[in-house]
């Protein structure tokens, strides 16, 4: 392997392992949502996701979608979309890392929705999450 190829390979590993934000390839409530690795705002959950157009916020633990401006709940994401989200490896890594580095204002962490995780990811979360909560 050439040095340039090795550096490129390492660069992509670093970027992939430590993104500042991630937008899973899943439409939730008809929108694309992204999760920010360093978002210290604990509302409506910590962490949470923002719609691509910044109008809506998703509670990742309940699937509730809120209008960002009014903080009113406009609906709940489909369970099948939340299952896809919670079984996305990059998403899980960001959630676990965020929970480990939670800011003081985040308060108590919410329970992981184990009913949305497949067995492999459920076991991984139990091994890697900062707190082990029952579903």
Image: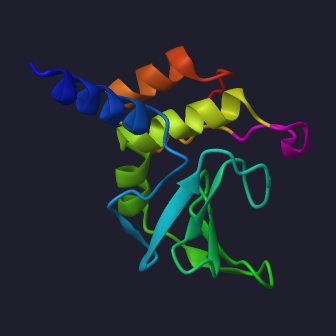
Quadrant (top left/top right/bottom left/bottom right) for the N terminus: top left
Number of marks drawn? 0
Q: Give the residue at the far front of this rendering.
A: 3
Task: Give me the residue at 64% from left, 21% from top.
Answer: 132
Query: Can residue 135 be seen at all in this image of the molecule?
Result: no
Pinpoint residue 117: horizontal percent, then vertical percent.
41, 38
Magenta range: 103-110
Q: Residue at x 78, y 49 (%)?
A: 40
Q: Position of residue 123 (x, y in %)?
A: 43, 20
* Residue 29 vertical placement versus 33 (above, below): below
Q: Which of 124 and 11 lies nearest the eye of the viewer?
A: 11
Please report the residue visible at 46 percent of the width from the left and 76 percent of the height from the top: 29
Please state if 95 lies on the left or on the right of 86 as rendered.
right
Q: Is residue 109 magenta?
A: yes
Q: Residue at x 54, y 19 (%)?
A: 128
In the image, residue 15 lies in the stretch drawn in magenta: no
Q: Nearer the viewer, residue 27 or 16?
A: 16
Does residue 67 sit above or below 121 in this rendering? Answer: below
Q: Is residue 86 visible from the viewing direction of this image? A: yes
Q: Is residue 131 above or below residue 89?
A: above
x, y (%) of residue 53?
Answer: 55, 81
Residue placed furthest toward the top: 127
The outermost residue toward the left is: 1
**Colour mapping used in the image:** rainbow
Q: Is residue 71 left or right of residue 67?
A: right
| Main secondary-structure element of the magenta-colored stretch | loop
The location of residue 60, given as percent across then percent down, is 58, 54
Q: Quadrant of residue 44?
A: bottom right
Would you identify the image quadrant in which residue 134 lies? Answer: top right
């Amino acid at each position: 392997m050439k040095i340039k190829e090795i550096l490129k390979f390492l660069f992509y590993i670093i970027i992939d392992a430590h993104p500042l934000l991630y937008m899973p390839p899943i439409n939730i409530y008809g929108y694309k949502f992204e999760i920010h690795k360093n978002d210290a705002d604990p509302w409506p959950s910590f962490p949470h996701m923002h719609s691509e157009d910044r109008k809506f916020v998703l509670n990742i633990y309940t699937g509730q979608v809120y209008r960002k401006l009014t903080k009113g709940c406009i609906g709940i994401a489909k369970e099948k979309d939340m299952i896809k989200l919670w079984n996305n490896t990059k998403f899980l890594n960001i959630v676990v890392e965020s929970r480990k580095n939670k800011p003081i204002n985040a308060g108590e962490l919410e329970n992981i929705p184990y009913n949305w995780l497949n067995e492999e990811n459920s076991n991984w979360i139990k091994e890697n999450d900062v707190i082990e909560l029952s579903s």
